[in-house]
């Protein structure tokens, strides 16, 4: 569950989110005989959404322009003999609209049939099955026997639109959402509809593959199985996946996302609508931030290398040993922090070092300083850490202002004898990983806290300890994004049972010799962090949240 | 009443194509006259004349011009010369015989609606008429009739020709605007209507070739003079393109309200000996077909044909005698609409193909029982459900052919052969 709490800064709303001002004037209209209040200037389809009522549609999407081509959102407006499409008709006070009459139902049924006559009926082998707009809406508005007895139109299958997206033209219903996305949101214009009539197909222009950093959004908004993600397709049936909301840790934007997982691990990520952060979208780089969480990439047990001998042990045991070593260690100990951890973790470990260890030698490892302030204009930021701002705030509040040079000098002179590194979670975002390991391993004793495996760390021979920490889906905590928006997330699941969060580590280190109070969670306990009634809570302007589905 | 040469008075004279020849018969005098008038006065005159759009919809021209918002934005006048409705070829005759008449009509209209930029959008297949128009435009430009300060009246107007690529859908006004903008020729969602946001999102008026040419005699004779022809609600004369089983097919100008059978029997010399009239498509292939019985009372005006459940459309009359199999005819028509659907709206994209495949199957002896009713259901659900009227254009012939000549369809399905021409299968449908 996400709770957005504005801390030090005001969240900058994204231009693409379509957030409406809360003071919008309201008008009263009647929908299916029920009086409802809707925002003035809304279209009828928006009025349905604002009132929580169902309406069939494919091509309309709240984050895109109106195409009006699927012809499914038919409504009857009193005084108008012709059925109208709800997406391109603006409400007028006193308007009487319905989509429950036999006339509308029949039109929607036929609209569905037109969509389905040339659509392959091979749902069992289609990757979209289970989250398909055609399936869902057929069950809701269709349930008829098709009278189509002709040969279906043959089109291209398994077309590579780009490195991440695969197209099946026969499944495509030509709603044009993907084309509008590349025209209006990513503004990269790779996609077009080629040919005409029922020979029309989505495609890319010569020499211009769908290779922008937002390409996978087209897969999300594709209502059918036409566009699939190369990364996810055929890896898991969607009904075997649970999902939970969290924030993306790929950069400092902090896009609201859903992670899809089961006991084998995480499989994919999709954006969750938040007008104040990411609108409807997320970037392709962010989509990969589930990969380093899965077991294959993780450090499973703590490891201690000492006088040439390597020994594995439970993280908790190592934590206690560390606690004994560090207590009162004083200024010969140092702590290195990266922007991967939660505010709560920073608070715990910084105050532990200040009071229990007795040092203010705490340093911020900035991964890519030269591109730190860059921004692609949509969502993707050069600061590829989820919580740099949270870290800086904690350091400031605790009066810490050490420079990296001090640390290097300290190691060089031998003044610093022990360095604890809260290493990066997403190692791919730390191009200087090797350099920093080489630099820091010069110290007498190096303790590296890491969620992921790393070959360089494994190869170190001095006095080194590696301790597995939890990844962002395994712990609760809050992250402050680039704009100062503090977003709180709950634990989603446990991937590595032996891993600890920094807060738990601090607790363990403090309780040297005492009875253990922190218990690890068994891997099988993959309970989603959200209970149903919490969905949508705490987020602003949530009228189009995906909890209602994209349709 | 009989055939009347009102718009087409000088069409027979080859010199009328040239600027000098056109001027010899009073050419561009009406432009000079109009430029001295108040633009609003011209609009009022056109309104009073009762001139209705000759492209098919029959919307009152003056009223359409009145929809332009007074917001100081640049306005565009577009001449729709895409003439792609099967059976229609009257604009072609007008552009070939009297290119300057169209140019003069456009300049007067542009002046009336205060537009300084006009385009003629001509269909890709009309390379001949396009060449003639291009020459005429060049002549007019050289003579100072197009460009800056036309006839010293302080009115600037540029006029250019744009050749389409041969798509039926580009005859739909917003499809034409998309094409002119360099986009894929697909109709745009309305509202906004072109008069408010058209070409380049600026106020735009789209008129048919014949409509714009008719503005010239309206200025010459005044609204009352124009109203001498036609009926109260369908004023003036109209050019009709007559094709099919008549002895003298061609383009004829008659006053609106003229009896259909007179046009067939008198002007067009009737049917071939021994043949009987079976049906007439009165307004281009998309207009519902009329039976021989219905033709008896039909007059060529918007109201009468609407009353008969059909439409005057672009004035393309296709005469069908009793040697034709109606299933064959519909098969050809349905193939056309399937081929031309732009594919934007689902009912049209999928429905046109579905109907064609069913009719194609019937014509090839693969029809099955229930398909007649299925065709009616499909067509009924395509009607009025899309952005533009192409879906209706595809559905209406199916509805009318199948309803009015149901026995021929049922016979074909049952006997696997045509009721009219027997067992011979025509290889007439190409893919």
Image: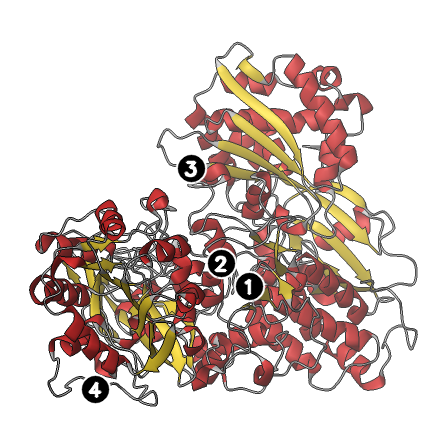
Q: Are marks 1 and 3 in contact (CB under 8 Å)?
A: no
Give the mark nearer the N terminus: 2 vs 1. Answer: 1
Chain for numbered disc 3: B
Left or right, A333 with respect to B66, comes to left
Q: Is residue A60 above or below residue A531?
A: above
Which residue in the structure is indicated by mark 1?
A165
Q: Are marks 4 and 3 in contact (CB under 8 Å)?
A: no
Left or right, B427 with respect to A251, comes to right
Give the spatial CA distance, label 4 vs label 3. 79 Å
Q: Is residue B221 above or below residue B368?
A: above
Which residue in the structure is indicated by mark 4?
A519
Chain for numbered disc 2: A
The answer to whether residue B9 is seen in the rendering is yes
Q: In front here: A74 or B228?
A: A74
Q: Residue at x 61, y 45 (%)?
A: B55
Give the mark nearer the N terminus: 1 vs 4. Answer: 1
Q: Are marks 2 and 1 in contact (CB under 8 Å)?
A: yes
Q: Which mark is residue B66?
A: 3
To the question of a shared chain for discs 4 and 3, the answer is no
């Amino acid at each position: 569950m996400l709770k957005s709490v504005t801390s030090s800064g005001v969240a900058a709303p994204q231009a693409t989110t379509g957030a409406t001002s809360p003071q919008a004037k309201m008008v009263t209209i009647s929908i299916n005989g029920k009086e409802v209040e809707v925002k003035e200037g809304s279209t009828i389809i928006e009025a349905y959404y604002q009132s929580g009522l169902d309406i069939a549609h494919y091509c309309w999407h709240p984050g895109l322009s109106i195409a009006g081509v699927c012809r499914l959102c038919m409504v009857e407006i009193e005084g108008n003999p012709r059925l109208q499409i709800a997406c391109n008709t603006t409400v007028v006070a006193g308007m009487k609209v319905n989509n429950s009459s036999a006339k509308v139902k029949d039109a929607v049924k036929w609209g569905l049939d037109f969509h389905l006559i040339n659509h392959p009926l091979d749902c069992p082998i289609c990757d979209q099955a289970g989250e398909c707009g055609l399936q869902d809406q057929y069950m809701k508005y269709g349930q008829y026997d098709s009278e189509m007895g002709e040969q279906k139109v043959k089109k291209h299958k398994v077309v590579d639109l780009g490195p991440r997206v695969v197209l099946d033209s026969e499944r495509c219903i030509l709603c044009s959402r993907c084309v509008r996305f590349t025209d209006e949101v990513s503004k990269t214009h790779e996609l077009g509809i080629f040919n005409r009539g029922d020979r029309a197909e989505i495609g890319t222009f010569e020499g211009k593959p769908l290779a922008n950093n937002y390409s996978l959004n087209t897969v999300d908004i594709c209502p059918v199985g036409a566009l699939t993600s190369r990364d996810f397709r055929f890896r898991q049936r969607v009904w075997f996946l649970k999902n939970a909301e969290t924030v993306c840790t790929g950069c400092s934007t902090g896009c609201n996302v859903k992670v899809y997982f089961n006991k084998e691990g995480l499989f994919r990520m999709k954006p969750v609508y938040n007008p104040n952060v990411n609108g409807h979208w997320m970037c392709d780089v962010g989509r990969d931030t589930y990969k380093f969480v899965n077991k294959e990439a993780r450090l499973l047990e703590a490891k201690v290398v000492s006088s040439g001998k390597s020994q594995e042990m439970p993280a908790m045991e190592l934590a206690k040993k560390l606690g004994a070593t560090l207590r009162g260690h004083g200024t010969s100990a140092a702590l290195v922090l990266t922007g991967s951890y939660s505010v709560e973790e920073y608070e715990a470990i910084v105050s532990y070092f200040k009071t229990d260890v007795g040092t203010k030698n705490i340093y911020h490892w900035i991964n890519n300083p030269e591109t730190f302030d860059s921004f692609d204009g949509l969502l993707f930021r050069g600061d590829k850490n989820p919580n740099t701002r949270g870290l800086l705030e904690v350091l400031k509040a605790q009066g810490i202002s050490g420079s990296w040079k001090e640390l290097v000098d300290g190691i060089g002179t031998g003044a610093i004898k022990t360095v604890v590194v809260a290493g990066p979670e997403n190692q791919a975002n730390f191009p200087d990983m090797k350099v920093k390991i080489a630099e820091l391993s010069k110290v007498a004793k190096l303790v590296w806290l890491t969620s992921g495996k790393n070959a360089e760390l494994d190869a170190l021979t001095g006095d080194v300890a590696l301790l597995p920490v939890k990844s962002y889906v395994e712990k609760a905590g809050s992250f402050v994004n680039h704009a100062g928006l503090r977003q709180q997330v709950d634990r989603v699941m446990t991937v590595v049972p032996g891993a600890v969060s920094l807060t738990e580590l601090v607790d363990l280190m403090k309780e040297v010799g005492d009875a253990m109070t922190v218990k690890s969670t068994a891997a099988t306990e993959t309970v989603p962090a959200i209970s149903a009634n919490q969905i949508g809570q705490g987020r602003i302007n949530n009228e189009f949240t995906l909890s209602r589905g994209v349709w | 009443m009989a055939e009347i040469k009102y718009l087409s008075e000088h069409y027979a004279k080859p010199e009328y194509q040239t600027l000098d020849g056109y001027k010899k018969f009073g050419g561009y005098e009406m432009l000079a006259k109009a430029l001295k008038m108040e633009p609003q006065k011209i609009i009022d005159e056109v309104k009073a004349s009762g001139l209705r759009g000759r492209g098919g919809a029959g919307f009152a021209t003056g009223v359409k011009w009145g929809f332009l918002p007074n917001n100081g934005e640049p306005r565009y006048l577009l001449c729709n010369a895409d003439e792609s409705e099967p059976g229609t070829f009257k604009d072609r005759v007008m552009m070939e015989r009297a290119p300057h008449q169209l140019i003069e009509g456009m300049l007067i209209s542009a002046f009336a609606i205060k537009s300084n930029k006009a385009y003629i959008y001509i269909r890709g297949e009309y390379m001949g008429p396009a060449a003639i128009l291009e020459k005429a435009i060049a002549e007019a430009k050289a003579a100072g009739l197009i460009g800056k300060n036309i006839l010293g009246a302080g009115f600037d107007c540029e006029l250019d020709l744009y050749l389409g690529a041969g798509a039926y859908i580009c005859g739909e006004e917003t499809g034409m605007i998309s094409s002119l903008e360099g986009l894929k020729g697909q109709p745009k969602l309305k509202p906004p209507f072109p008069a408010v946001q058209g070409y380049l999102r600026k106020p735009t008026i789209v008129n048919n070739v014949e409509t714009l040419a008719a503005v010239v005699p309206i200025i010459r004779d005044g609204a009352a003079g124009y109203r001498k022809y036609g009926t109260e609600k369908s004023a003036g004369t109209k050019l009709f393109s007559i094709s099919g089983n008549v002895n003298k097919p061609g383009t004829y100008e008659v006053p609106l309200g003229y009896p259909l059978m007179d046009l067939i029997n008198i002007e067009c010399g009737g049917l071939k000996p021994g043949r009987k009239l079976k049906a007439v498509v009165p307004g281009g292939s998309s207009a519902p077909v009329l039976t021989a019985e219905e033709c008896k009372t039909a007059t060529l005006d918007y109201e009468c044909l609407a009353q008969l459940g059909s439409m005057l459309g672009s004035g393309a009359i296709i005469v069908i005698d009793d040697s034709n199999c109606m299933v064959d005819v519909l098969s050809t028509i349905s193939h056309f609409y399937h081929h031309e659907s732009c594919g934007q709206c689902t009912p049209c994209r999928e429905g046109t193909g579905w109907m064609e495949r069913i009719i194609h199957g019937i014509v090839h002896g693969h029809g099955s029982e229930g398909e007649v009713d299925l065709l009616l259901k499909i067509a009924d659900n395509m009607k009025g459900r899309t952005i533009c009227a192409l879906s209706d254009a595809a559905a209406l012939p199916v509805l009318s052919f199948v309803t009015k000549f149901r026995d021929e369809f049922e016979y074909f399905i049952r006997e696997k052969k045509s009721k009219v021409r027997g067992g011979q299968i025509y290889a007439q449908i190409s893919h």
